[in-house]
Image (cartoon, helix red, strand yellow):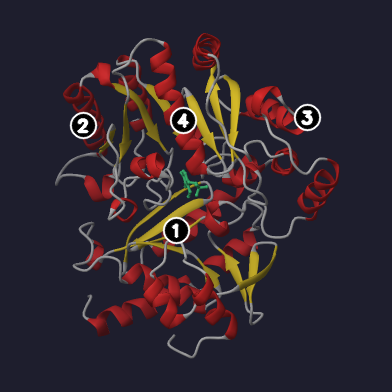
């Protein structure tokens, strides 16, 4: 840190404004230039290798150099590099991928709508919820309930759904009609003496009270990630989702499952909703849909929504929504191949088989004096740092998490700091031995972080 910037770091600072970064700090410290990938590893411009403990952004499920996906993209590029789905045009790859998504997704998905990103998928979800209720003549039923610490993206509505401070601060968000209910995080949110069942009942009550306070006739949808990812890998308590789904049903509120991280095997089932035990009216998918070799997202809606929306397009003349790159043929071709590979390697079964090893490392590390809680499902997990293991956290939050991530980076592992948690979400092609390698430096990195925190007065 604070060494002179390399030529490429200097060029970067002159050319790019980076997402999710402090530009002033970046200018001082320099970015890390990643040059190439192989298996679960990436290499920086100096040739140093790193285990990608977060699959990039929870997305490169097949790792960083899959020759089949590269060849599939090349072939489709040569055949039909671009076409769209607007105004009655279509192409085979878009249809075939939608058929495959329909076969896989829970909740009897009837139609698939494409975009390029997770944010756009959730944007589509909310527009569809509004359009659907207008079609039914329920013009007041438009509010969307999300959750504190949710992550649903960064476009104006999806950033509004996101329940994290930096996504709102100085962006004049959230917009109207968006509400945030309680986070289902027992360790952090429980009242003294409260059991997990009592906590869950209270959180579900918060949701119902919010609906009643707003007026059920004004609430269109509830949106949730099965496991909250960017909010800190928060695994909800047993029974949470079935109770939330029941409340949503009671007030005729659509249930949107944001499967952008959890979809396609990550939690040990094809979809997170299956692992968490609920059915949604619609599903958002992205990231692992193409292994992230190309940008593509999909929204799957159930029969009822499809019928109402399609009929309404007939009444008013068109469905005035869509993106130039939605259903891009190269993205769809790579998506079809990605799903074929997931089937071949049995991605959900593979995750279930690897999960105990992954969990054992996190649970062992929970014994470290600096770790307050270990959380995990399938191949996604987190360690939350805490002073004296207290869920109240540090007096100055957000110092130790990034420090630990830095200590791990220096030891050849890339993870994501989320305030004072660090998240792990390795490619699903990881092996048991590689899981051991991923976790091998964590204890030493925790010790170093603890020593630093004591010296800095954080402990
Ligand atoms: N939903 C979830 C659950 C996500 O994790 C993300 C991205 N991390 C998004 C939506 C937004 O996706 P994108 O960055 O592709 O817009």
Crowd tier of the residue under label 1, counting other residues whose Cα lies within 10 Å: few below 14, some 14–19, many 20 or above: many
The answer to whether the residues at label 3 and label 1 have Cβ atoms under 8 Å apart is no
Q: Residue at x 34, y 42 (%)?
A: 160
Quarter where residue 197 is shown: top left
Q: Which residue is mark 3?
A: 92
Q: CA distance from mark 3 to mark 1?
A: 38 Å
Q: CA distance from mark 1 to mark 2?
A: 28 Å
Q: Of helix, strand and loop, which one carries label 4? A: helix
Screen quadrant of the N terminus: bottom left
Crowd tier of the residue under label 2, counting other residues whose Cα lies within 10 Å: few below 14, some 14–19, many 20 or above: some
**Whether residue 245 is visible:** yes
The answer to whether the residues at label 4 and label 3 have Cβ atoms under 8 Å apart is no
In the rendered image, the vertical position of residue 1 relative to residue 208, given as above or below: below
Q: Of helix, strand and loop, which one carries label 2? A: helix
Quarter where residue 456 is shown: bottom left
Q: Tell me which numbered mark, 3 or 1, is placed earlier along the sequence.
A: 3
Q: Is mark 3 within 8 Å of ligand 1?
A: no
- Discs 4/2, front: 4
Closest to the observer, 62 or 28: 28
- Discs 1/4, front: 4
Label at residue 206: 2
The answer to whether the residues at label 1 and label 2 have Cβ atoms under 8 Å apart is no
Q: CA distance from mark 4 to mark 2?
A: 24 Å
Q: Give coordinates of residue 295: x percent, y percent.
A: 62, 47
Q: Which residue is mark 1?
A: 423
Q: Is residue 227 left or right of residue 302?
A: left
Screen quadrant of the C terminus: bottom left
């Amino acid at each position: 840190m604070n060494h002179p910037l390399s030529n490429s770091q200097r060029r970067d600072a002159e050319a790019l404004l980076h997402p999710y970064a402090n530009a002033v700090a970046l200018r001082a410290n320099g970015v890390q230039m990643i040059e190439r990938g192989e298996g679960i590893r990436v290499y920086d411009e100096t040739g140093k290798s790193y285990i990608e403990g977060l699959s990039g952004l929870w997305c490169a499920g097949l790792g960083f150099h899959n020759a089949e996906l590269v060849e599939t993209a090349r072939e489709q590029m040569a055949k039909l590099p671009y076409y769209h789905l607007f105004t009655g045009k279509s192409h085979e790859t878009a249809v075939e991928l939608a058929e495959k998504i329909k076969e896989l997704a829970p909740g009897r998905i009837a139609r698939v709508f494409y975009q390029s990103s997770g944010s756009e998928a959730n944007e589509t979800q909310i527009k569809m919820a509004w359009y659907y209720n207008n079609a039914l003549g329920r013009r007041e039923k438009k509010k969307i309930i999300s959750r504190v610490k949710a992550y649903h993206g960064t476009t104006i509505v999806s950033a509004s759904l996101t329940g994290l401070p930096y996504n709102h601060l100085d962006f004049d968000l959230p917009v109207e009609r968006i509400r945030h209910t309680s986070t289902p995080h027992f360790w952090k949110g429980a009242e003294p003496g409260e059991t997990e069942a009592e906590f869950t009942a209270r959180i579900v009550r918060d949701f119902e009270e919010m609906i009643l306070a707003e007026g059920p006739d004004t609430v269109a949808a509830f949106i949730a990630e099965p496991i909250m990812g960017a909010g800190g890998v928060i695994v909800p308590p047993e029974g949470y989702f079935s109770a939330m789904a029941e409340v949503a049903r009671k007030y005729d509120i659509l249930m949107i499952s944001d499967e952008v991280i959890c979809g396609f095997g990550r939690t040990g089932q094809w979809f997170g909703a299956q692992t968490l035990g609920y059915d949604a009216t619609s599903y958002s998918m992205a990231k692992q849909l193409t292994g992230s070799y190309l940008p593509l997202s999909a929204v799957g809606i159930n029969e009822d929504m499809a019928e109402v929306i399609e009929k309404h397009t007939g009444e008013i003349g068109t469905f005035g929504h869509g993106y130039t790159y939605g259903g891009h043929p190269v993205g769809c071709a790579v998506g079809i191949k990605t799903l074929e590979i997931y089937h071949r390697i049995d991605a959900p079964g593979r995750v279930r088989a690897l999960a105990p090893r992954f969990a054992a490392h996190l649970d062992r590390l929970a014994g470290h004096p600096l770790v307050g809680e270990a959380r995990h499902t399938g191949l996604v997990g987190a360690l939350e740092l805490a002073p004296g293991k207290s869920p109240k956290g540090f007096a100055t939050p957000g110092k130790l998490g990034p420090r630990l991530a830095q200590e791990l980076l220096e030891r050849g592992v890339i993870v994501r700091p989320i305030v004072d948690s660090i998240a792990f979400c390795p490619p699903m092609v990881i092996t048991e031995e590689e899981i051991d390698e991923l976790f091998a430096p964590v204890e030493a990195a925790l010790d170093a972080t603890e020593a630093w925190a004591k010296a800095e007065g954080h402990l």
